[in-house]
Image (cartoon, rainbow, N blue to C red):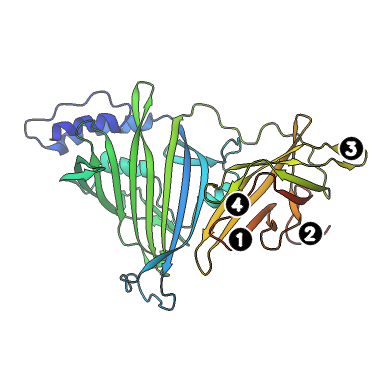
């Protein structure tokens, strides 16, 4: 059985081309001792890659809100129910064990609106470093855990434990930030020798973190790369029990993964330096339907100017295309079922040139919106299970200075 662990390491760690044969003693730890230098070199050679990352976040609260939690798990039997959920779609670039994000079809790397949404108050660090701590470094425990079932397949299971002193698990929660020891298991396909799943459970977080417990599961997929095979996440789930009585569940799904060898750009290309002037009244017709059942933060939104706008001898012609994106799509289940869609327009394409644009609603449907929110972002809100903005919908806006400050600024 341990002979096959050799093949696992070949698949799991790129750059590892030769592995010594397991000795007669059959001790797998001797094998790990001999391959660690090669493992370290293999990890350092991992090239950057990018994926489409879909994020679904769920927040659960207690069914009986009158009950208060006095300590972690003192109401472990209390029924939880889904309170709200939201979705994001992003491009993620993974390099040197860290993730950088940008909106889909954007050249701007980690703009502020993405950064604030992607990095929640609770984070468990980078799982690539967690894998390295288990298979490259010296974990406190690494042993076979027998057979297991994964997606109706018979697989191998291994258990491990990593001490806090050697931990790569960094918990960020509220005002707390620190490394925690962790343990769990990983699953291996006995036919392909691929790592299928990593399960991580850190030790009890300190009280000041406001977190009672965290459990993470990472399912992997292979990515061919220059004659080798990288192992990249397919789905990451993080479930956290909070001291305030709430629970959160984060699911990241990675798709369309490919090598990323291009130099990242730091700003959107194709913009004119001349923004659309402020205080112009624009009527925009939505070119594509926005349906809360399918939409996600990051989706591009386009709308057409339905009539020309003139100012100081210049004209924005009819048919100019305003482009923006959904920043956030959220569904709430308590206290009443409702949907909120956050939208921002960022440019206006006219005569082949995209000009920076900032808008604020001029007239709104009192039961739907759009309503001004902040930083050029507007919201549509409806007390219903679903919100649909049909193709052809017309909304009325006024342009603002692109550097407009929401508070303390007068026209």
Q: Mark 1, residues whose alpha carbon is within 10 Å: few (<14), some, or many (≥20)? A: some
Q: Is residue 377 above or below residue 246?
A: above
Which of 41 and 67 lies nearest the eye of the viewer? 67
Name the mark on residue 388.
4
* Corner quadrant of residue 190: top left
> Residue 289: x percent and y percent?
62, 44
* Corner quadrant of residue 8: top left
Which residue position holds label 2? 409
Considering the numbered disc 2 on the image, is that residue within a helix, a strand or a loop?
loop
Which of 177 and 93 lies nearest the eye of the viewer? 93
Which residue position holds label 1? 382
Q: Nearer the viewer, mark 3 or mark 1?
A: 1
Quarter of the image with the N terminus is: top left
- Decide which of tag 2 and tag 1 comes sooner along the chain: 1
> Residue 281: x percent and y percent?
82, 49
Quarter of the image with the C terminus is: bottom right
Mark 3 to mark 1 CA distance (whole Å) = 38 Å
Name the mark on residue 314.
3
- Decide which of tag 1 and tag 4 comes sooner along the chain: 1
Considering the numbered disc 3 on the image, is that residue within a helix, a strand or a loop?
strand
Q: Residue furthest right?
A: 313
């Amino acid at each position: 059985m341990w002979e096959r662990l050799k093949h696992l390491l070949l698949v799991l760690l790129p750059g590892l081309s030769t592995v010594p044969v397991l000795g007669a003693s059959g001790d797998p730890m001797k094998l790990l001792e001999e391959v660690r230098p090669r493992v370290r070199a293999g990890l350092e050679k991992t090239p950057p890659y990018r994926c489409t990352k879909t994020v679904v976040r769920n927040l659960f609260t207690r069914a009986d809100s009158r009950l208060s939690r006095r300590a972690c798990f003192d109401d472990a039997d209390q029924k939880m129910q889904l309170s709200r959920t939201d979705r994001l779609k992003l491009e993620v670039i993974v390099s040197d064990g860290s993730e950088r994000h940008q909106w889909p079809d954007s050249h701007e790397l980690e703009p502020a609106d993405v950064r604030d949404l992607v990095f929640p108050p609770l984070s468990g660090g980078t799982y690539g470093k967690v894998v390295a701590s288990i298979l490259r470094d010296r974990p406190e425990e690494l042993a076979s855990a027998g057979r297991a079932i994964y997606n109706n397949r018979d697989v191998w299971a291994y258990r491990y434990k990593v001490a806090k002193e050697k931990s790569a698990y960094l918990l960020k929660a509220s005002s707390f930030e620190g490394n925690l020891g962790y343990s769990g298991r990983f699953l291996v396909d006995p036919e392909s020798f691929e790592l299928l799943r990593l399960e991580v459970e850190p030790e009890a977080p300190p009280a000041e973190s406001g977190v009672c417990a965290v459990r993470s599961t990472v399912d992997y997929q292979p990515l061919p790369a220059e004659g080798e095979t990288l192992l990249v996440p397919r789905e990451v789930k993080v479930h956290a029990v909070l001291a305030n009585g709430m629970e959160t569940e984060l699911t990241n799904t990675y798709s369309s993964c490919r090598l990323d060898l291009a130099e990242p750009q730091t700003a959107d290309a194709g913009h004119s330096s001349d923004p659309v002037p402020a205080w112009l009244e624009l009527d925009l017709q939505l070119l594509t339907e926005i349906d809360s059942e399918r939409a996600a933060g990051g989706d591009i939104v386009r709308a057409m100017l339905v009539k020309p706008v003139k100012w100081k001898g210049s004209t924005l012609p009819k048919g100019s295309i305003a482009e923006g994106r959904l920043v956030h799509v959220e569904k709430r289940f308590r206290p009443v079922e409702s949907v909120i869609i956050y939208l921002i327009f960022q440019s206006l394409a006219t005569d082949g040139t995209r000009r920076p644009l900032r808008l604020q609603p001029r007239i709104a449907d009192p039961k739907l919106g759009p309503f001004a929110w902040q930083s050029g972002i507007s919201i549509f809100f409806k007390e219903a299970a679903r919100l649909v903005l049909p193709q052809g919908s017309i909304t009325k806006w006024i342009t603002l200075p692109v550097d407009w400050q929401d508070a303390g600024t007068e026209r």
